[in-house]
């Protein structure tokens, strides 16, 4: 990653370290200018005030809540219970079910969206005469709300009236597949929907990366007799790595928060076989109004996201 | 077509023939993948209830009707939902852009000691799962008396979009040669003058890209809209459209019609500005 190295290195120092002619006037001027710091504070203040209000304070509040038995449904006020909620989480079958589903969705849909997105990006990068239909076809799924994608694909996977079963019937399937009514199939349908919905955003990021790869690299490889396959692994993938990492980070973080698509497709059913962590937290806090336990669940989800983020950032640091 | 081309450059014809067919199939695959769900919903929205439940299902509507659209607007206040979605998405995008442009300029251009740390802080805030912030945000909004107002959604959406917008804009600011700005300042411009007259116009594609990302994110958001603005008059489209479904009934043609109405504004926006969006994304890739 060239990005982080160039960002970390202070570009304004370059003239001096180069040891060439005297430093640019703007550099010395800026060094003497005390308003630089004031300007920075003023420019960054709105962002950090908003972050404090909407992210930092809620996180603190969340951790605080997790040590209380606090139900909005009853008349009783919050009661301090220490780590009791945390112990309950470990014994909670619903938590392990939801955590398992969330991890499964992440492990399936993140690589799935990357592969489909890469394929779409490489197809879209071909020299078409008219670019707009392909470009719009990549932008449309990205612009479609997740909840709409869930509704549309629930309709696709409808047992009697869905287009998926109609295609299968035309291909010779004898019986209609009960997509959303059988746990493994419902999970498969949800994963397919998530991959469809998210792969085009991947493709847009990767397409931008593809178009940045100099043609001369491929021409040189062609001269050296490299096959298409070799070119893909030796040129395309390494040159695309920064875009792939950015796309993967965003996709993994959103996959862990999966809510809209299972909620609109199955409401977590059949049973709670497709319930994700986000849905369990939403159900516990919004429907059962159990803020204390819901907050504890949220702390676990928070830690899970933090672990994933730390893992990626470490990997990014290694490649830099 | 092929034979004519073949006569012109016979030597290149053999390898060209198959790639041309492949090119067509590649384009067809991408277009089908992108458009089919929206197309299917459009076809469903034109079918009558009777045709819809006939088996085997029809692909093309036999008696196209617009009745579902009329009903989509009469069964629920769809126009109101559209207005709410547009207001919330536009206002939060505007605020996001102002806040993130300021922050991104400071990170990319000012002589900050901890620029990487500051950027990491802003980006890391997008790592926090929204659902975990839901209950505390709900309590905050209730304390501030903002539940069921546009502000209840605009403030969180602004923060939601801050990381993406800041990242896009930082990379754009960094891609603009510093010399241009320095030259402007040597010519007597103040730093703010250089920002407004030199840097911002050059960063316009980046601001536009960030704006579209923010707009789509805000238009898309479901969980907060469901929880903070549940009041009938303040619902946004994603929340409103889920209300067409009853306990046991799914009026699919009407839901499809409502979905088409909800999709069209964004689809038009994307179609009109697709080159700038994709161009902006491409330029964003420059830094990588």
Image (cartoon, coloured by chain):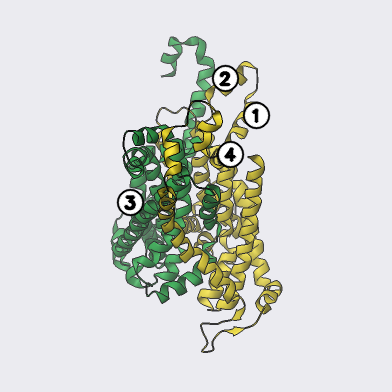
Residue on which the image places disc 3: B265
Q: Which of marks 1 and 2 is nearer the N terminus?
A: 2
Shade representing chain A? yellow
The relative height of residue A164 versus residue A93 in the rendered view (above or below) is: above
Q: Which of marks 4 and 1 is in front?
A: 4
Label 2 vs label 4: CA separation?
29 Å
Task: From the viewer's side, name the closer residue of A156 and A280.
Answer: A280
Residue at 36% across / 71% down in the picture? B148
Which type of secondary structure does the marked residue at label 1 adopt?
helix
Pointer 4 local density, CA inside 10 Å: few below 14, some 14–19, many at least 20: few
Contact flag, marks 4 and 1 (Cβ < 8 Å)? no
Q: Circle 1: is it few (<14), some (14-19), or many (20+) Cα within 10 Å?
A: some
Which mark lies nearer to you, 2 or 3?
A: 2
Chain for numbered disc 1: A
Judged by depth in the image, the label closer to the viewer, 3 or 1, is: 1
Residue for badge 1: A234
Using the rendered image, report if marks 4 and 1 lie on a common chain: yes
Q: Do the residues labelled 3 and 4 touch (CB within 8 Å)?
A: no
């Amino acid at each position: 990653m060239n990005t982080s190295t160039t960002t970390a290195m202070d570009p304004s120092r370059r003239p001096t370290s180069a040891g060439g002619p005297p430093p640019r006037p703007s550099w010395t001027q800026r060094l003497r200018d005390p308003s630089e710091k004031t300007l920075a504070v003023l420019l960054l203040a709105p962002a950090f005030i908003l972050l404090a209000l909407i992210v930092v304070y809620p996180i603190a509040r969340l951790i605080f809540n997790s040590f209380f038995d606090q139900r909005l449904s009853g008349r009783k006020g919050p009661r301090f219970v220490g780590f009791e909620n945390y112990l309950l989480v470990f014994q909670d079958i619903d938590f392990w079910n939801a955590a398992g589903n969330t991890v499964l969705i992440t492990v399936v849909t993140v690589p799935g969206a990357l592969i489909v997105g890469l394929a779409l990006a490489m197809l879209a990068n071909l020299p078409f005469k008219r670019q707009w239909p392909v470009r719009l076809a990549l932008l449309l799924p990205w612009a479609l709300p997740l909840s709409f994608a869930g509704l549309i694909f629930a309709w696709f996977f409808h047992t009697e009236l869905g287009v998926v079963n109609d295609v299968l019937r035309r291909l010779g399937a004898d019986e209609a597949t009960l997509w959303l009514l059988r746990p493994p199939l419902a999970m498969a349908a949800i994963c397919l929907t998530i991959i469809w919905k998210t792969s085009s955003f991947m493709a847009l990021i990767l397409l931008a990366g593809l178009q940045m790869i100099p043609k001369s690299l491929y021409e040189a490889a062609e001269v050296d007799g490299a096959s298409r396959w070799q070119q893909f692994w030796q040129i395309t993938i390494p040159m695309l790595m920064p875009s792939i990492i950015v796309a993967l980070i965003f996709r993994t973080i959103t996959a862990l928060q999966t809510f809209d698509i299972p909620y609109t497709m199955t409401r977590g059913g059949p049973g709670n076989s497709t319930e994700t962590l986000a849905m369990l937290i939403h159900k516990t806090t919004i429907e059962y109004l159990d803020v204390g336990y819901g907050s504890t669940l949220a702390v676990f989800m928070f830690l899970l996201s933090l672990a994933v983020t730390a893992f990626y950032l470490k990997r990014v640091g290694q490649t830099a | 077509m092929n034979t004519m081309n073949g006569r012109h450059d016979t030597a290149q014809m053999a390898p060209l023939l198959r790639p041309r067919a492949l090119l067509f199939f590649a384009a067809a695959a991408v277009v089908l993948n992108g458009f089919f769900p929206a197309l299917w919903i459009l076809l469903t929205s034109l079918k009558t209830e009777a045709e819809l439940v006939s088996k085997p299902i029809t692909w093309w509507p036999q008696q196209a009707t617009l009745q579902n659209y009329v009903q989509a607007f009469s069964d629920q206040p769809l126009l109101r939902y559209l207005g709410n979605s547009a207001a919330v998405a536009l206002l939060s995008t505007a605020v996001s852009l102002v806040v993130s442009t300021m922050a991104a300029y400071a990170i990319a251009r000012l002589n900050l000691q901890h620029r990487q740390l500051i950027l990491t802080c802003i980006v890391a805030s997008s790592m926090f799962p929204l659902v975990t912030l839901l209950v505390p945000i709900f309590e905050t909004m209730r304390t501030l008396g903002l539940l069921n107002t546009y502000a209840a959604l605009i403030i969180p959406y602004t923060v939601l979009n801050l990381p993406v917008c800041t990242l896009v804009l930082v990379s754009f600011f960094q891609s603009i040669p510093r010399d241009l700005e320095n030259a402007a300042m040597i010519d007597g411009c103040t730093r703010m003058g250089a920002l407004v007259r030199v840097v911002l116009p050059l960063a316009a594609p980046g601001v536009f890209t960030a704006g579209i990302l923010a707009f789509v994110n805000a238009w898309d958001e479901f969980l907060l809209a469901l929880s903070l603005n549940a009041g009938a008059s303040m619902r946004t489209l994603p929340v409103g459209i889920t209300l067409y479904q009853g306990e046991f009934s799914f009026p699919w043609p009407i839901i499809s019609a409502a979905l088409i109405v909800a999709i069209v504004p964004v689809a038009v926006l994307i179609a009109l500005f697709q080159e700038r969006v994709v161009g902006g994304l491409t330029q964003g890739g420059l830094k990588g």
